[in-house]
Image (cartoon, rainbow, N blue to C red):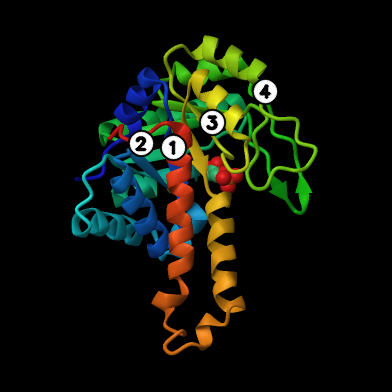
């Protein structure tokens, strides 16, 4: 199977009242774990790549080469989209050229007029290349310089303005934040989500900061039009915990225990379990 745009995948999810998981990738183990789980669960999947992770892996061409190679060598048959996460204007163009099948332009920090102008241009470019595009309204909070900000709630009128430009799916802030949620987090604003849903009609919505949101809130968000849930932090946490356990149990001191393939195996297994759990929660199992 070749990479596909996320457009049809998410329209189908919206109509079927489930969501497709967007899982961020950081390296080969991550990517392989997510693709293998998607195939085992017969679930569509979106591989998310931030600009930082793309740089870490060597560049967007490396990412495209690695993902396409895995699709072929692992004989992956489920629909897979390779998506730029929170892209800058320049990053979007780089990914278009490198062969990504989906991009997100994050113009949420720009004045609305500039966000509109750049999003309009990028929609045209993305669709000319046959790939999907996500836009964002209402900055999604998170930890910045040690200060944890509350997630912003998007203005439904602004959401409509951006949706009407022709984006394929829209991330709207509804009190969600990236990273670990603070103890005193107020939960998702379903009031905002309902207003956004009414404003944008059939447009599939995206829930960022999908790690650590209670399952009942995720399910409710899906019933209100969320068709893509982004998860990164929880995979990072379980990967690191499993790797720490390997060393705490002195497995690296066992014969050949220093082999990196052995060191990274528990973390790889932990990502697989987490991805499976999320696919079950999002309702995408068997929907390939
Ligand atoms: P978390 O790291 O909070 O899961 O958020 C991921 C995300 O939204 C990527 O865009």
Image spot of residue 90 (x, y percent): 45, 46
Q: Nearer the viewer, residue 87 or 266?
A: 266
Q: Residue at x 38, y 63 (%)?
A: 28
Image spot of residue 21 (x, y percent): 43, 39
- Vertically, is 270 above or below 162? below
Q: Residue at x 59, y 71 (%)?
A: 244
Front tag of 1 and 4: 1
Q: Nearer the viewer, residue 141 or 186?
A: 186
Mark found first going from the N terminus, 1 or 2: 1
Residue at numbered disc 4: 189
Q: CA distance from mark 3 to mark 2?
A: 27 Å
Residue at numbered disc 3: 136
Badge 3, how many Cα within 10 Å: few under 14, some, many 20+?
Answer: many
Mark found first going from the N terminus, 4 or 3: 3
Ligand 1's quadrant is top right
Q: CA distance from mark 3 to mark 1?
A: 26 Å
Q: CA distance from mark 4 to mark 3?
A: 17 Å
Q: Are marks 3 and 2 in contact (CB under 8 Å)?
A: no
Count of numbered circles on the image: 4
Image spot of residue 56 (x, y percent): 47, 64
Numbered tag placed on residue 285 in the rendering:
2
Task: Find numbered disc 2 in the image and state the secondary structure of the residue it sits on.
Answer: loop
Placement of the C terminus among the 4 image quadrants = top left
């Amino acid at each position: 199977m070749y990479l596909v745009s996320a457009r049809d995948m998410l329209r189908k999810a919206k109509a079927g009242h489930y969501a497709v998981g967007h899982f961020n990738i950081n390296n080969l183990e991550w990517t392989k774990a997510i693709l293998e789980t998607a195939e085992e669960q017969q679930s569509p999947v979106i591989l998310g790549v931030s600009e930082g992770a793309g740089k870490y892996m060597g560049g967007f061409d490396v990412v495209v080469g690695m993902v396409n190679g895995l699709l072929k060598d692992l004989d992956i048959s489920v629909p897979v989209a390779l998506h730029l996460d929170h892209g800058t204007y320049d990053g979007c163009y780089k990914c278009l050229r490198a062969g990504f099948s989906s991009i997100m332009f994050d113009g949420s920090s720009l004045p609305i007029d500039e966000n509109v102008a750049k999003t309009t241009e990028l929609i045209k470019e993305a669709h000319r290349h046959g790939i999907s595009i996500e836009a964002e309204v209402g900055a999604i909070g998170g930890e910045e310089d040690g200060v944890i900000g509350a997630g912003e709630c998007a203005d439904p009128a602004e959401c409509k303005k951006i949706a009407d430009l022709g984006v394929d799916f829209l991330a709207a802030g509804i009190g969600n934040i990236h990273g670990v949620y603070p103890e005193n987090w107020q939960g998702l604003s379903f009031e905002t989500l309902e207003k956004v849903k009414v404003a944008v009609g059939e447009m599939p919505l995206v829930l960022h900061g999908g790690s650590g949101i209670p399952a009942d809130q995720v399910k409710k968000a899906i019933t209100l039009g969320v068709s893509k849930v982004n998860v990164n932090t929880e995979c990072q946490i379980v990967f690191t915990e499993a790797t720490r356990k390997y060393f705490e149990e002195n497995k690296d001191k066992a014969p050949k225990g220093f082999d990196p393939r052995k060191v990274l195996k528990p973390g790889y297994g932990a990502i697989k379990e987490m991805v499976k759990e999320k696919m079950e929660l999002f309702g995408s199992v068997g929907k390939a």
